[in-house]
């Protein structure tokens, strides 16, 4: 990835700026600002419920970004999340905001043994990857047999998008299902993101305040402009219904020769 890569602008540079803005505005802004691909608490609650996350669940968040969703799970359910995220600026932000255990790692080459985690989730990551199966296989590898795997995936509803944002490869729903099947992940339940409760007003207000603070400080920086443009393009595709978010609860299939633990 080069320094001019829009993904670096969006997921590394802006991540670090976000932590700075939270330091100015106060810790009550951390969670809303740090859920960068997942949107609402309603979506996180639906997925956590579908996955059966409870107190003590040892869960991997692969592509964790600034760590908001994992911190939300720890706070609301007493789960024990571990974060993996390739962008060092985002890793540092997650540690700074939530003190989360985090490793800087590509989701397709995770530094964990097979079956390390009870479960894993991946929020808004798949559409940033051209090679989805290497990432999904790795996600399945590190989860124990029968463990839950949750995904938030932005899928395209048309064959070709009119405006293809750089660094994004939105799968069709059929492609997503084929990828999951090929990677030992059985779909148990799914729901369109639009069908779960939306973002509460106070949550949205806090997220907006952080964005405004980042813009106030960095609005003249070309990296901010590129990241904002990227977000706007994706926002329009979602608004036009050409890209649709879907929450998917899966089970990690038993490995050959193994007995599922539940
Ligand atoms: C839209 S953000 C979502 C962040 C976080 N999951 C959330 O919901 O707030 C997508 C994340 O995927 C990460 N990502 C990109 N390529 C990745 C890879 N190969 N392995 C793991 N994560 C990756 C990005 O760095 C970014 O943090």
Image: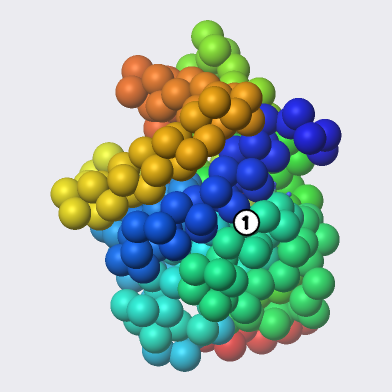
Residue placed at 52% from the left, 63% from the top?
67
Write the residue at 31% across / 42% down: 208
- Which residue is under mark 1? 90
Q: Where is residue 176, by image quadrant? A: top right
Instruction: Specify whether 192 is left or right of 157.
Output: left
Image location (x, y in percent) of residue 144? 65, 80
Observer-nearest of 181 and 169: 169
Q: Nearer the viewer, residue 216 or 80?
A: 216
Please tell me whether mark 1 sits on a helix, a strand or a loop: helix
Q: Residue 179 location in percent, x, y?
A: 65, 45
Residue with the most extreme left position:
201
Residue located 49% across and 68% down the image: 97
User: For the N terminus, which image quadrant?
Assistant: top right
Queried on whether the Cβ of the residue with tag 1 lies below 8 angstroms from ligand 1, the answer reads yes
The reply, left or right, for residue 229 in relation to residue 235 is right
On the question of residue 187 being in view, the answer is no
Coloring basis for residues: rainbow
Instruction: Find residue 84 and report its horizontal and vertical position in percent.
Output: 67, 65
Residue 10 in view of the camera: yes
How many numbered marks have been drawn onto this rendered protein structure?
1
């Amino acid at each position: 990835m080069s320094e001019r890569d829009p993904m670096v602008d969006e997921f590394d540079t802006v991540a670090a700026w976000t932590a700075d803005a939270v330091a100015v505005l106060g810790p009550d802004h951390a969670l809303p600002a740090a859920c960068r691909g997942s949107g609402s608490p309603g979506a996180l609650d639906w997925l956590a419920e579908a996955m059966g996350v409870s107190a003590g669940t040892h869960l991997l968040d692969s592509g964790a970004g600034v760590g908001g969703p994992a911190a939300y799970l720890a706070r609301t359910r007493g789960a024990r999340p571990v974060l993996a995220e390739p962008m060092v600026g985002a890793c540092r932000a997650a540690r700074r905001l939530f003190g989360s255990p985090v490793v800087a790692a590509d989701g397709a080459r995770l530094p964990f043994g097979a079956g390390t985690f009870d479960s894993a989730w991946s929020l808004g990551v798949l559409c940033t990857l051209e090679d989805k199966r290497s990432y999904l296989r790795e996600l399945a590898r590190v989860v124990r047999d029968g463990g839950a795997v949750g995904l938030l995936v932005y899928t395209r509803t048309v064959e070709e998008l009119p405006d293809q944002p750089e660094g994004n490869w939105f799968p069709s729903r059929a492609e997503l299902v084929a990828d999951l099947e090929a990677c030992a992940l059985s779909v148990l339940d799914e729901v369109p993101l639009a069908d779960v409760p939306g973002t509460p007003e106070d949550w949205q207000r806090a997220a907006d305040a952080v964005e405004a603070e980042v813009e106030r400080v960095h609005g003249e920086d070309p990296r901010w402009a590129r990241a904002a443009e990227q977000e706007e393009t994706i926002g329009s595709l979602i608004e036009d219904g050409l890209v649709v978010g879907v929450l998917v609860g899966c089970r990690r299939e038993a490995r050959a020769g193994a007995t599922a633990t539940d």
